[in-house]
Image: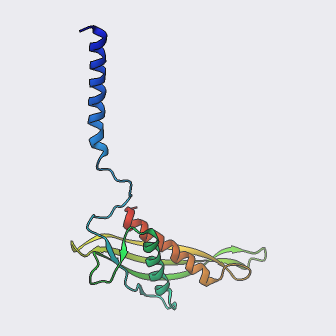
């Protein structure tokens, strides 16, 4: 055999070995981004507990979580009896804080902070997937702008998004 032919065979063999060694390491990787165990397909979202005197914020938050999970389509919503996992949450506090002032030192806008604690439990393995406390806010104005209710809805939407991300992505 001539030397050029031997070099080509050696080069091709080396490339084949390198590619062959790299391919198996790429195989099990998934682009789905899910941090969930494979057995969790159905999740239950019971009514969030509310420790504040605010009316119906727990219902808004529960609905927002269900809507986020449904929109994402990684998990299916189910009842507590047949679910693989369950989202358990409590609204701990709801607090208004001044945000901006006018030149006459009057409050112009507020931030309404909603503080919650949530846990997602794996019902099949009887363990906690994660437990976390969050505080999110929404802005509202006393005149010409978003209302306090709209500020609460903004904060609730952010919390629902946080819960979805933590559950399906592990962020």
State the residue lying farthest toward the top.
2
Residue 87 appears in view: no
Compared to residue 127, the image places residue 14 above or below, namely above
In this view, which residue lies farthest toward the right? 104
The answer to whether residue 72 of the structure is visible from this angle is yes
Q: Residue at the location (30% across, 40% down)?
A: 23
Give 11 or 130, whichever is nearer the viewer: 11
User: In the picture provided, is 3 more to the left or to the right than 47?
Assistant: left
| Image location of residue 2, percent across then percent down | 27, 8
Q: Report the side of 146 relative to 46 (left or right).
A: right
Taking 153 as reference, is 23 above or below it? above
Where the C terminus falls, by quadrant?
A: bottom left
Tell me the quarter of the image containing the N terminus.
top left
The residue lying at 39 percent from left, 62 percent from top is 169
Left or right: residue 154 compared with residue 5: right
Q: Nearer the viewer, residue 153 or 14?
A: 14
* Residue occupying the far front of the picture: 1
Q: Position of residue 33 (x, y in %)?
A: 39, 58
Residue 19 image position (x, y, % from top left): 31, 33
Q: Quadrant of residue 168?
A: bottom left
Q: Work out whether 3 lies above or below 57.
A: above
Left or right for 59, reference 85: right
């Amino acid at each position: 055999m001539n030397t050029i032919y031997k070099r080509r065979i050696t080069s091709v063999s080396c490339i084949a070995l390198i590619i062959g060694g790299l391919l198996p390491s790429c195989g099990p990787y998934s682009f789905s981004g899910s941090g969930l165990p494979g057995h969790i397909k159905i999740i239950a979202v019971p009514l969030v507990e509310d420790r504040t005197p605010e009316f119906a914020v727990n219902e808004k938050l529960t609905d927002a979580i269900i809507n986020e999970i449904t929109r994402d389509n990684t998990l299916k919503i189910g009842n507590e009896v047949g679910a693989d996992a369950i989202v358990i949450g409590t609204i701990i506090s709801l607090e208004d804080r001044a945000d901006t002032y006018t030149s006459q030192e009057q409050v112009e806008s507020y931030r309404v902070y909603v503080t919650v604690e949530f846990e997602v439990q794996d019902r099949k393995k009887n363990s906690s997937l994660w437990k976390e406390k969050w505080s999110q806010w929404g802005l509202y104005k006393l005149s010409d702008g978003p209302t306090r209710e709209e500020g609460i809805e903004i904060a609730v939407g952010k919390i629902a998004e946080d819960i979805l991300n933590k559950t399906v992505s592990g962020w």
